[in-house]
Image (cartoon, rainbow, N blue to C red):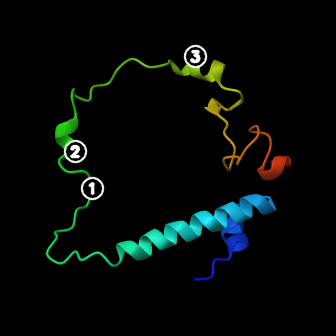
Amino acid sequence: MEIDVRKVANLAKMSLSPSEMSELEKDLRDILGHIERLLTVDVEGVPPTFGPAKSASLRTEPDVPRPCLQRDVLLRLAPEVRDGNVLVPREAPLGGSLEEGPGGEEAK
């Protein structure tokens, strides 16, 4: 199977060096190879599972509200606030600071 690593990286908004592209291609080939092996497993008669078995029974204590930061304290701690709300970047950066976008360019 042909993998267009540049297209995958572009869709994921990743800025990669040639060596990182090569490493990503190897990783993707390994993942697809593993999936191909899984397709050969005989699962006839095995009931499907849709999540962790009996996860509700894993809770060790009741879910009750607890004290948390007061709004005014949280707003004082936030790096940037507007109209009583904490400002966050439109997109999570791939690296660097919150002011930088992928590859270090200034976020807009």
In the image, taking residue 57 as reference, residue 32 lies left or right, namely right
Spot occupied by residue 48 in the image (x, y as percentages of width and height): 21, 67
Foreground pick, 76 / 47: 47
Q: Of marks 3 and 2, which one's residue comes earlier in the chain?
A: 2
Residue 108 visible in the snapshot = no
| Mark 2 Cα-neighbour bin, 10 Å: few <14, some 14–19, many ≥20 | few
**58 and 38: which is toward the camera:** 38
User: In the shown orientation, is residue 4 left or right of residue 47?
Assistant: right
Give the residue at mark 2. Answer: 55
Q: Residues within 10 Å of mark 3 (few under 14, many from 20)?
A: few
User: Under tag 2, what secondary structure?
Assistant: helix
Q: How many marks?
A: 3
Whether pointer 2 and pointer 1 mark residues with C-beta atoms closer than 8 Å, the reply is yes
Q: Could you tell me residue 45's position as x and y percent? A: 14, 75
Question: SS class of the residue under badge 3?
Answer: helix
At a point 66% along the width and 47% down the height, the residue shown is 92
Q: In the image, is 32 to the left or to the right of 85?
A: left
Query: Please, is residue 48 above or below residue 104 in the view?
Result: below
The nearer-to-camera label among 3 and 2 is 2
Residue annotated with mark 3: 73
**Distance between the Cα atoms at labels 1 and 3?**
38 Å
Label 3, label 2: how far apart the Cα atoms are: 35 Å
Residue at 83% over, 46% down: 104
Q: What amino acid type is highlighted by mark number 2?
A: Ser
Quadrant of res 86: top right
Residue at image coords 68%, 61%? 23
Image mark for residue 64: none
- Of callouts 1 and 3, the N-terminal one: 1
Compared to residue 15, the image places residue 60 above or below, namely above
Dot 3 amino acid type: Val
Is residue 79 something that shows in the picture?
A: yes
- Tag of residue 51: 1
